[in-house]
Image (cartoon, rainbow, N blue to C red):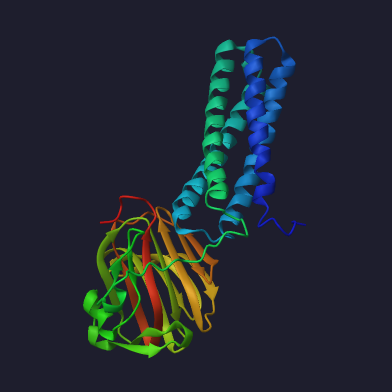
Amino acid sequence: MLPDWAPNLHPLVIHFPIALLFTAALVDTLGILWRRSDFLRRGAFSLYLLGTIAVAAAWFTGTKAADSVFLATDANALLTEHADLGELMLYVFGGYALVRLLTFTLNLEERAGVRAIVWLIGLGGVGLTWYTAEHGAELVFRHGAGVQAVSTEAVVFVAPDSTTSTGPVMNDAGGWTFKPTRASAWMSSMTVEGNAESLTPSLMDGEERGDVLALTSTGDPVMMTFNHTMGSVQVDGAINMDGFDGSLMIVTHVVDAENFLFTSYANGAVRQGRSENGDLILMADEPFSPDGWFTIRAVADQTHFRAYANQELVAHGHGDAGTDGPVGIRINGTGTVLVDFLQTSTLRGGEDH
């Protein structure tokens, strides 16, 4: 039933909680001024109750909407904040509706002190609504979230001297970019954990992609990270796993070889989680069947972890935020992984160093 121009249901329902809650606060304020008006008291209660139901609908459609859009790099942190604020609104107004129901049923609002307290709490909730709505508006009007005309393809930041670079180069997004030009550049620039002799780098013809990095593994897991500490991070790339049997992990917040966060692309599944002392703890496990070249994006932003393939969300996990650390990849399997480029971007200014 959605019109063709609507990316999801969220934009069509989000105005209801805003209108209802702001009107409820206005009616409640008038009720404070005209305390003897039972009509205003009942009206404020009814509007807050309807507004809470609308908040629940907005939160539910919002979680679906967040998983249906592919955003520009500088919008991902804002999306995380908006999602967290929406969840907070659900808890705040859910609890507030119960309080209003209790005070209304027991006629406690006839007491001036009780009426003033619930009125002030309601105003605080409306302030939270304003702040949350402002984040949502910024996502749409500044970053074009859900707007079909806006391009969200990853921009590869290649330095002018990239043709002579021996490894990843720092980019304008607070991270690094690796576009292969020499087979030895990748391994010589990275901190390697594991049996490096089990992994052989080479350059191959990627046809329209030009030269691409081929990482051929004989089976032992190898993790490679670049010495650049990052916090909230987005990792973009383009890979081909047709000749590989195993998993390619995007590893972030690396403490050491056994402690890190990861997004794993493999034949059959995309998994997100953390390694704690070598034990893998999953946050998300979704089916995935790669075919040929595909673009990847792994976002690790505070407690939100999103994985994309070809600009479509394939997994969205939640867990504890990681400790700032390097970013890289971990290969576990046999065969050859082809890499066109890898790029990291910081999502929150001042976190990378």
For this rendering, which residue is in front, 43 or 128? 128
Residue 126 visible to an observer of this rendering: yes
- The image shows residue 62 at horizontal and vertical percentages of 60, 50
* Residue at 50% across, 77% down: 294
- Image quadrant for the N terminus? bottom right
Residue 248's quadrant in the figure?
Answer: bottom left
- Image quadrant for the C terminus? bottom left
- The image shows residue 153 at horizontal and vertical percentages of 51, 66
For this rendering, which residue is in front, 318 or 72? 72
Residue 261's quadrant in the figure?
Answer: bottom left
For this rendering, which residue is in front, 60 or 230? 230
- The image shows residue 239 at horizontal and vertical percentages of 44, 79
* Residue at 61% across, 59% down: 149
- The image shows residue 65 at horizontal and vertical percentages of 60, 55
Q: Residue furthest right?
A: 1
Rendered position, 115 above or below 153: above
Rendered position, 254 above or below 127: below
* Residue at 63% across, 29% down: 22
Q: Residue furthest front?
A: 160
Residue 16's quadrant in the figure?
Answer: top right
* Residue at 26% across, 76% down: 165
